[in-house]
Amino acid sequence: MAAGLLLSGAIGALLATAVPAHDPGSGIVDPPPDRIVIKVATVNGSGCPQGTAAVAVSPDNTAFTVTYSEYLAQVGGSSDPTAFRKNCQLNLIVHVPQGFTYAVASADYRGFAALQSGASAVQRASYYFQGSSNTEFRNHPFRGPYNDNWQATDTTDWAQLVWAPCGVQRNFNINTELRVSAGTSDPARTSFMTMDSTDGDISTIYHLAWKECPDT
């Protein structure tokens, strides 16, 4: 993906999923009517080679998605010894309507895993704004035998949301990782975990919460 590629607009009703109902006293407001625009500043990692990740914004400004097409970690069989771990770091420039700020309230991850008996895998993610400390990874473990689609959700309580600074541009960073371990499984048999699909790309959905910035 070329740096600065602009991706926005409608992505279908399936992806236009609102964040959970908010506490009226939290300061959370409805999404602004103007659209947000996301530019990809950089995309790096073995799980997202150039041209294999894309970002789009839902029509109602409550979510954005990251779509991967070659995000696969595997062990066993003829797998490359380094293929057991794949990662991707996205550095996003998020342009929001004037007078508003946002936070990522939850993130939904989907993919497919085929884990032999004795094998295991983990999906991890962390999120932070440029200039702030990196948050702890959130882990979702899976154990074999497993041969099915998988889904994992990271959710943040309203009181713990980390908001983008008002009036200052801070890039938003998303670090994700897939890791597969052979464990006690037969080393001749392959185990894998993926955030892509043979019949279409898998989209990771990040749900946004909105707040009005104080008057300056």
Image (cartoon, rainbow, N blue to C red):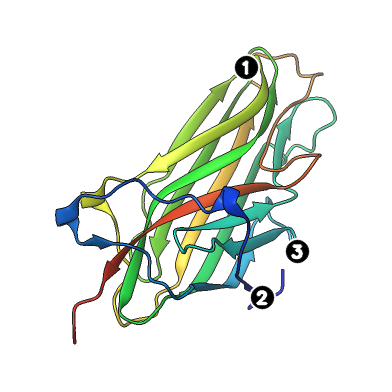
Residue positioned most to the right = 78
- Residue shown at 31% from the left, 82% from the top: 167
Q: In this rendering, is residue 184 above or below 17?
A: above
Q: Position of residue 129 (x, y in %)?
A: 39, 66
The quarter of the rendered structure image containing the N terminus is bottom right
Q: Earlier in the sequence, mark 2 or mark 1?
A: 2
Distance of label 2 from label 3 (alpha carbons): 10 Å
Which amino acid type is marked by label 3? Gly
Q: Earlier in the sequence, mark 1 or mark 3?
A: 3
- Observer-side mark, 2 or 3, equals 2
- Residue shown at 75% from the left, 37% from the top: 81
Secondary element under disc 3, as helix, strand or loop, is loop
Secondary element under disc 1, as helix, strand or loop, is loop
- Residue shown at 48% from the left, 49% from the top: 17
Q: Position of residue 52 (x, y in %)?
A: 74, 58
- Residue shown at 44% from the left, 58% from the top: 62
* Proximity of marks 2 and 1: CB atoms separated by less than 8 Å: no
What is the crowding at mark 3: few (fewer than 14 residues within 10 Å), some, or many (at least 20)?
few
- Observer-side mark, 2 or 1, equals 2
Which amino acid type is marked by label 1? Gly
Residue ID for mark 1: 144
Distance of label 2 from label 1 (alpha carbons): 39 Å
Relative to 52, 146 lies left or right: left
Residue ID for mark 2: 5
What is the crowding at mark 1: few (fewer than 14 residues within 10 Å), some, or many (at least 20)?
some
Residue positioned most to the bottom = 216
Q: Position of residue 68 (x, y in %)?
A: 68, 52
Q: Position of residue 156 (x, y in %)?
A: 32, 46
Q: Quadrant of residue 172?
A: bottom left
Relative to 136, 5 lies left or right: right
Residue ID for mark 3: 51
